[in-house]
């Protein structure tokens, strides 16, 4: 396709009534393509409403790709049908334009599905998208103007020495393009398979993560091998690379390899699952992600901690959700000597009742831990079933109810080195001040 000849053919078509058929075919292809894409999106979006946000977002993003693809297919069909009866020079120009548009949309869809996290795109990623779109439009411009064959011939004639062989520039570009395309398809297929597996409720969460990680690794390896074969690289050269990789693992990468192996061990033996509340060394939180190299703990303060998987294998791990989600929470207090424990203990045991998140069974209990220097040391224990929500809030609510009994005079706390009668006088004075404040 050369630009002067193309312009001449277009001007010739303008003098013929067949140009209206070509323009109508373009308009109808665009309208029908967008309408079909919207119809399919709305129909499958209704089905995906109950399937979770991940599938719904996937349908919405793929609908943006489906429109250009449908338009391209309809334009190709129109060119084939009209080409049997008349010239289709206008459609010859429209096809590469819409092909580039569809290519850009497909590439953006694959990139966003693989690299975008929680719908957020970095500045570097957005810059890469702009550069990619510019390159595609530049290639289309070269094709329409007829300069592409000359550039292809130039790249094919210039060769670079690589070892004992010489490789043309066009072969290198084709090799890079094939590797990138197959890798992107493998990563996209792995991400789609992972979303599908994570939505299966009949399989344990750890097993789902293992299957997703293994499937993605297998797809990447297959994509690399296929792309190397397409380029013409002998796969036996990988044996040398494998030997070098083995030496590297033995010398300097053993920690990384250990973390990866530990990650698969954790997932396979199911000692940890996403959502478990664990404590490792001085770190505590809920397991939010289990990757092959590291595990992410989300603390109750919102801070994420990235722990190497080797640490979870070699260190002592307290898992509050491994066998049961029920966790005991306790608070201690020291009551003054002279208090009637037969009255105080039942009173304390009844306090957690009615507090949100506190279980009725097992029942709250009070134990006399020891006889302290200033009074009886009592421990009030109760159970909750959602440790991932934290213990501070429910513990604070129970302590407030204990303080209300102290203010009412039903419980007398022991003061270090103080006479209980002094405590009684101080509490009476405090109640008197509170009553005067309320009266005023």
Image: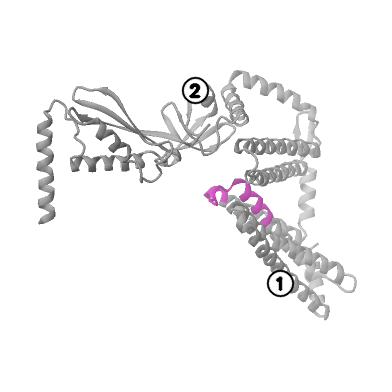
Which x, y percent locates residue 202? 65, 42
Which residue is at the front of the view, 28 or 436? 436
Total numbered labels placed on residues in the image: 2
Quarter of the rendering containing residue 243: top right
Local crowd size for mark 2, using a 10 Å CA cut-off: few (<14), some (14–19), many (≥20):
few
Indicate the secondary structure of the residue bearing disc 1.
helix
Side of 240 relative to 383 (left or right): right
Which x, y percent locates residue 193? 68, 44
Local crowd size for mark 1, using a 10 Å CA cut-off: few (<14), some (14–19), many (≥20):
few
Indicate the secondary structure of the residue bearing disc 2.
loop
Residue 215 image label? none
At 61% from the left and 50% from the top, the residue drawn is 112
Tell me, yes or no, whether the highlighted magenta stretch contains residue 203.
no
Q: Which residue is mark 1?
A: 31
Which x, y percent locates residue 156? 79, 45
Q: Nearer the viewer, mark 2 or mark 1?
A: 2
Tell me, yes or no, whether the highlighted magenta stretch contains residue 115.
yes
Q: Which residue is mark 2?
A: 315
Which x, y percent locates residue 191? 65, 45
Q: Do the numbered discs 2 and 1 sit on residues whose CB atoms are within 8 Å?
A: no
Side of 229 relative to 241 (left or right): right
Side of 419 relative to 105 (left or right): left
Quarter of the rendering containing residue 348: top left
Of the numbered discs 2 and 1, the one sitting upstream in the chain is: 1
> How far apart are the two marked residues, 2 and 1, measured between alpha carbons?
62 Å
Which residue is at the front of the view, 60 or 21? 60
Q: Quadrant of the N terminus?
A: bottom right
Q: Quadrant of the C terminus?
A: bottom left
Query: Which secondary structure dominates the residues rendered in magenta?
Result: helix
Picture colour scheme:
one colour
| Span colored in magenta | 104-125
Above or below 151: residue 75: below
């Amino acid at each position: 396709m050369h630009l002067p000849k193309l312009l001449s053919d277009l001007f010739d078509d303008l003098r013929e009534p067949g140009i209206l058929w070509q323009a109508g075919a373009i308009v109808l292809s665009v309208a029908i393509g967008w309408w079909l894409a919207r119809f399919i999106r709305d129909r499958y979006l209704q089905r995906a409403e109950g399937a979770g946000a991940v599938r719904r977002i996937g349908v919405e993003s793929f609908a943006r790709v489906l429109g250009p693809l449908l338009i391209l297919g309809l334009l190709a069909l129109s060119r084939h049908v009209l080409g049997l009866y008349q010239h289709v020079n206008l459609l010859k120009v429209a096809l590469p334009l819409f092909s580039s548009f569809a290519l850009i949309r497909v590439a953006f869809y694959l990139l966003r599905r693989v690299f975008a996290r929680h719908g957020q795109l970095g500045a570097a990623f957005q810059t890469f998208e702009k550069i990619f779109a510019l390159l595609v439009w530049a290639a289309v411009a070269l094709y329409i103007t007829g300069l592409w064959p000359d550039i292809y011939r130039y790249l094919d004639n210039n060769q670079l020495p690589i070892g004992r062989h010489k490789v043309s520039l066009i072969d290198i570009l084709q090799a890079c393009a094939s590797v990138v395309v197959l890798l992107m398809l493998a990563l996209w297929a792995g991400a789609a398979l992972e979303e599908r597996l994570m939505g299966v409720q009949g399989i344990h969460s750890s097993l789902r993560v293992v299957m997703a990680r293994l499937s993605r690794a297998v797809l990447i390896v297959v994509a690399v091998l296929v792309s190397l074969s397409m380029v013409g690289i002998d796969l036996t050269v990988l044996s040398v690379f494998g030997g070098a990789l083995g030496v590297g693992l033995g010398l300097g990468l053993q920690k990384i390899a250990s973390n990866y192996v530990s990650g698969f061990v954790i997932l396979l033996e199911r000692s940890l699952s996403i959502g478990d509340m664990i404590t490792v060394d001085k770190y505590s939180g809920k397991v939010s992600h289990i990757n092959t190299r590291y595990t992410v703990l989300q603390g109750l303060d919102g801070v994420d901690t990235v722990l190497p998987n080797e640490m979870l294998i070699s260190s002592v791990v307290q898992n509050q959700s491994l066998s049961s989600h029920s966790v005991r929470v306790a608070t201690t207090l020291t009551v003054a000597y002279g208090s009637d424990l037969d009255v105080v203990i039942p009173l304390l045991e009844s306090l957690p009742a009615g507090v949100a998140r506190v279980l009725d069974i097992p029942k709250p209990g009070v134990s006399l831990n020891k006889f302290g220097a200033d009074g009886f040391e009592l421990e009030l224990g109760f159970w909750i079933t959602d440790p991932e929500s934290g213990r501070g809030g429910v513990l604070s609510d129970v302590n407030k109810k204990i303080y209300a009994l102290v203010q009412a005079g039903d419980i007398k706390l022991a003061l270090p080195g103080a006479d209980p009668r002094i405590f009684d006088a101080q509490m009476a004075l405090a109640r008197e001040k509170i009553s005067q404040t309320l009266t005023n």
